[in-house]
Amino acid sequence: MLTEDRLREVLGRVPGATQVIVGRRGGKLVAIVVSPEYADIPDVDRQSQAWGLVLDNFSDAEAAQVSFVYTNTPEEKAQAEVEAAAEREAG
């Protein structure tokens, strides 16, 4: 079984990664990779980079345990946190 720590270690290899957060949602792993270098990289390339690491370092069965990898700049992560807080308050 793929652990949160193993996924965090592999995704920490993303160039410029300053933060990697990994948790479980519905039994699957979800990760957030934060890198200021993402500012000039299109989303599709960010995802290719992150998923390339997942697919190159884990078996197919382990990779299937990863539901999603968010690839954010620090500013995008901050904005997502503001939006999530607003939703909680409104909910």
Image (cartoon, grey):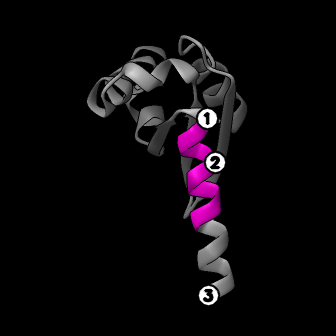
Seen at 59% across and 77% down, the residue is 87
Secondary structure state at the residue bearing disc 1: helix
Q: Which residue is mark 3?
A: 90
**Mark with earlier residue (3, 1):** 1
Please provide the residue range marked out in magenta.
Answer: 75-83
> Disc 3 versus disc 1: distance between alpha carbons?
25 Å
Q: Is residue 41 above or below residue 24?
A: above
- For the residues labelled 2 and 3, the Cα–Cα distance comes to 19 Å
Image: 35 above or below 1? above
Of residues 73 and 59, the one drawn nearer to the viewer in this rendering: 73
Q: Is residue 77 magenta?
A: yes
Q: The residue under label 1 is which amino acid type?
A: Pro
Question: Marks 2 and 1: in contact by CB < 8 Å?
Answer: yes
Residue 15 appears in the rendering: yes
- Which residue is under mark 1? 74
Q: Position of residue 44 (x, y in %)?
A: 27, 30
Instruction: Give the residue type that dot 2 points to.
Output: Ala
Q: Hey, which quadrant is residue 56 in on the image?
A: top left
Spot occupied by residue 9 in the image (x, y as percentages of width and height): 67, 20
